[in-house]
Image: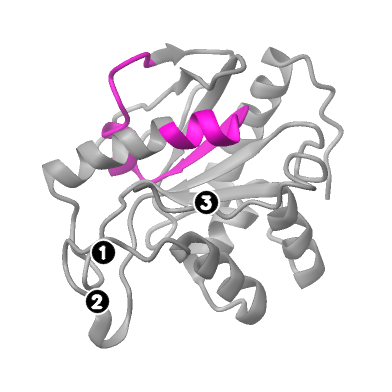
Amino acid sequence: MTIDPWVNRDSYGKNGPCPGLSILVLGESSYTKGKHGVRGAPLPPDWNQRIIGSFLEKGDDLTIKRATDVFYATPLTDRGQERKFWQSTAFANFIQMDMGEPGKRPRKREWLVGQQAFQQYLLELRPQFVLAVGFGLWDNLPDKCRQEHHFSVKPPRGPTGVERPCLLYPNGNGSALVCGIRHTSRGFSHEVWSRWVMASIAEAARLHQIVCRGGR
């Protein structure tokens, strides 16, 4: 069973960084805290909703904060702007199983299950732009229907010197442009990756014939 995404159906895609462009932020994996965290157990069906709900309430999740800010030239300082962003943006984790504790990496089977979930999220949400948070996630996106998409702006190189260009995947109503960034948990540069994300957003808007005026 695919974990339910965070999404507000009434305002999805309406008032985000590029109003009219539907956006999915795709996290890699997660773990439940306390005694209930069991490595490899299915995450609760509402776990994605809990992650964003908790961030909007407390604002203390740096990984989510950076994944929000990367859509803008300068980090958001107004909690109201963060709420506006997440009322228009969907969120889901790729890995459907509990990692048990911080720092654990997904196993091959968990990546494969995540690929199936990703395809379901594409068909359910029909995002026109997907932010893939983490190089490990980008590297494990499905090969099926995967098409590299190059445009005038080149992606930043990761620590190993590898360039990860945007990808195109069918979403049931055209295509989704997938942009990969370094994971926002550590060693993350807002200046470097926000330029890439904003350029990719502009390219997605161009592909979908949307005039992107910015929604901040």
What label does residue 37 carry, if any? 2
Residue drawn at 31 percent across, 52 percent down = 96
Q: Residue at x 31, y 16 (%)?
A: 144
How many numbered markers are drawn?
3
**What colour scheme does the image use?**
one colour
In the structure shown, which secondary structural element does the residue marked by tag 3 occupy? loop
Classify mark 2: helix, strand or loop: loop
Q: Earlier in the sequence, mark 1 or mark 2?
A: 2
- The crowd level at tag 3 (other Cα within 10 Å; few <14, some 14-19, many 20+) is many
Q: x, y (%) of residue 145?
A: 37, 13
Residues rendered magenta in the picture: 120-146
Q: Nearer the viewer, residue 130 or 162?
A: 130
- Report how far apart the C-alphas of labels 3 and 1 lie in the structure: 16 Å
Marks 1/2 in contact by CB < 8 Å: the verdict is yes
* Res 137 seen here: yes
Circle 1: element type: loop
Compared to 156, does 5 lie above or below?
A: below
Q: Position of residue 190 (x, y in %)?
A: 56, 53
Residue 175, picture quadrant? top right
Q: State how far apart marks 1 and 2 are (Cα).
A: 7 Å
**Is residue 126 found inside the magenta-colored segment of the image?**
yes
Q: Please give the residue where the numbered disc 1 appears in the rendered image.
A: 98
Name which of mark 3 and mark 2 comes first in the sequence.
3
Tell me whether the residue at label 3 lies in contact with that at label 2, contact meaning CB atoms closer than 8 angstroms.
no
Query: How far apart are the alpha carbons under marks 3 and 2?
Result: 20 Å
Magenta stretch containing residue 102, yes or no?
A: no
The image position of residue 34, as x and y in percent, is 29, 86
Residue type beneath disc 1 = Asp
Q: Position of residue 216 (x, y in %)?
A: 83, 50
Q: State the residue position of label 3.
A: 5
Q: Nearer the viewer, residue 197 or 101?
A: 101
